[in-house]
Image (spheres, rainbow, N blue to C red):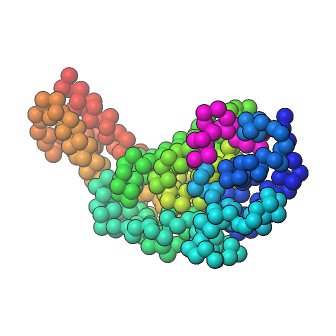
């Protein structure tokens, strides 16, 4: 098996150290080696002596994609993010590769060719994320209308989410590389937490398909869960299998809503994976590919503290005071369950309120209207009286279970009668 010769190993380590100091997004040695091989193939090959180029591409320092027909595709994929890596490597390249001057690519990152590559970490990171400066302001009224149409009885939640997203979309966020918003939706079952997350994709991104959902109950095992998210690393079983599911999806949909459903059911090691996402807005998979979460809205849902809704029933307090008491109790339970380093990275912990009977009536009305359009397309003509809607809403109504009974009642009390 071919091994990296000391001169090239030293060169890559120096470049890696300098790239990290400058905050350059490409710091993996294998990516730096690919950049070198792509720009100076003949000069780099002499470090290996008389070794076939195909053998080099199969070297373990290189990702396994580098072989056969996928070589060109892989190099093309890294073309944009590796060109400017020569800026911190100019001195070493001149000395080690015997170049007469800095490579042309060394100036790609800068507006002026004469600009020195000595920059602060913050400036380098800004250059690595130019798209953050062109983010469009949030159309508050349009987003509000869309969310009010999709979610019933959670007006306060809508306003809190809009307030946070307005801040990030106005480029006033103090941490622009982090996700657009990191929310934890808590509350009893059936109150619209998941529907709200789905509606965000349509309301904010104008694309209801820009929605990525992870059922965190499937990530209760530490090693298996992490491998599913980011893919197994070198030396682990399955390294030659498909890449990590999450990193791949985010690379495909860099602007999306990521739903982490029932976050409390994931293994603690899986929680720690998301610390990097919440902190830096980046996640690197087992193949060394880095996915950016800078334009992702992260929504976690949780049933932690749902029992508080049973303990604190409405009494002499007003509805708003009652919700304050519930929210405080639920947030206290969440703090006990989630590690502090994860909880402190959440932008907004929002506790959904229980749905009143009037809320459930409105949900029933909207669901029936949706089914009516489908029935009309199938040749049915129906008129639904208000009394029928009220019956569907009231039957099996339980404020602690939300509106989950509505669809079941529509099927049993309405649609089954048409068969």
Picture quarter containing residue 107?
bottom right
Residue 396, image x, y percentages = 33, 39
Q: Residue placed at 10% from the left, 34% from the top?
A: 381
Q: Is residue 14 left or right of residue 199?
A: right
Farthest residue to the right: give it: 6
Q: Is residue 312 left or right of residue 236?
A: left
Farthest residue to the front: give it: 100
- Is residue 146 shown above or below 126? above
Q: Residue placed at 20% from the left, 43% from the top?
A: 369
- Is residue 213 shown above or below 107? above
Number of marks in the rendered image: 0
Picture quarter containing residue 26?
bottom right
Q: Residue placed at 62% from the left, 46% from the top?
A: 75
Of residue 98 and residue 146, the one placed in the foreground of this image is 98
Of residue 154 and residue 84, the one placed in the foreground of this image is 84
Q: Is residue 170 visible?
A: yes
Q: Is residue 8 left or right of residue 367?
A: right
Of residue 250 and residue 304, the one placed in the foreground of this image is 250
- Is residue 379 shown above or below 185? above
Of residue 4 and residue 311, the one placed in the foreground of this image is 4
Residue 197, image x, y percentages = 43, 52
Does the stretch in magenta take in 120?
Answer: no
Region rendered in magenta? 58-77
Picture quarter containing residue 70?
top right
Image quarter of the C terminus: top left
Residue 156, image x, y percentages = 39, 65
């Amino acid at each position: 098996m071919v091994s990296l010769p000391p001169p090239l190993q030293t060169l890559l380590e120096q470049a890696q150290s300098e790239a990290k100091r400058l905050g350059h997004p490409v710091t993996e040695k294998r990516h730096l080696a690919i950049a070198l091989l792509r720009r100076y193939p003949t000069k780099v090959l002499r470090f290996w002596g008389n070794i076939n180029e195909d053998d080099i591409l199969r070297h373990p320092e290189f990702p396994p994609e580098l072989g056969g027909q996928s070589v060109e595709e892989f190099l093309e994929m890294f073309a944009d993010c590796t060109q400017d890596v020569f800026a911190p490597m100019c001195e070493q390249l001149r000395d080690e590769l015997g170049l007469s001057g800095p490579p042309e690519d060394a100036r790609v990152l800068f507006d002026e060719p004469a600009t020195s590559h000595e920059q602060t970490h913050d400036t380098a990171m800004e250059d690595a994320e130019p798209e953050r400066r062109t983010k469009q302001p949030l159309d508050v009224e349009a987003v509000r209308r869309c969310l009010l149409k999709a979610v019933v009885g959670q007006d306060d939640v809508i306003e809190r989410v809009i307030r946070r997203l307005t801040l990030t979309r106005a480029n006033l966020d103090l941490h622009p590389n982090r996700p657009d918003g990191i929310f934890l939706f808590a509350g009893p079952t059936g109150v619209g937490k998941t529907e709200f997350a789905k509606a965000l994709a349509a309301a904010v991104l104008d694309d209801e398909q820009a929605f990525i959902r992870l059922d965190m109950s499937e990530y209760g095992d530490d090693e298996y869960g992490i491998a599913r998210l980011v893919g197994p690393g070198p030396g682990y079983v399955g390294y030659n299998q498909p890449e990590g599911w999450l990193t791949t999806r985010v690379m495909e949909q860099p602007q999306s809503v990521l739903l982490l459903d029932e976050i409390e059911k994931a293994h603690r090691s899986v929680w720690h994976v998301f610390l990097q996402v919440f902190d830096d807005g980046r996640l690197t998979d087992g193949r060394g590919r880095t996915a950016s979460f800078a334009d992702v809205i992260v929504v976690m849902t949780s049933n932690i503290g749902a029992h508080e809704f049973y303990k604190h029933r409405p009494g002499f307090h007003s509805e708003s005071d009652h919700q304050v008491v519930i929210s405080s109790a639920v947030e206290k339970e969440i703090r006990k369950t989630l590690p502090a380093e994860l909880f402190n990275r959440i932008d907004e912990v929002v506790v959904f309120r229980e749905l009143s009977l009037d809320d459930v009536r409105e949900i029933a009305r909207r669901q029936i209207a949706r089914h009516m359009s489908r029935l009309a397309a199938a040749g049915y003509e129906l008129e639904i009286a208000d009394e029928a809607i009220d019956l569907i809403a009231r039957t099996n109504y339980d404020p602690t279970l939300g509106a989950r009974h509505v669809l079941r009642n529509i099927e049993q009390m309405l649609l089954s009668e048409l068969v």
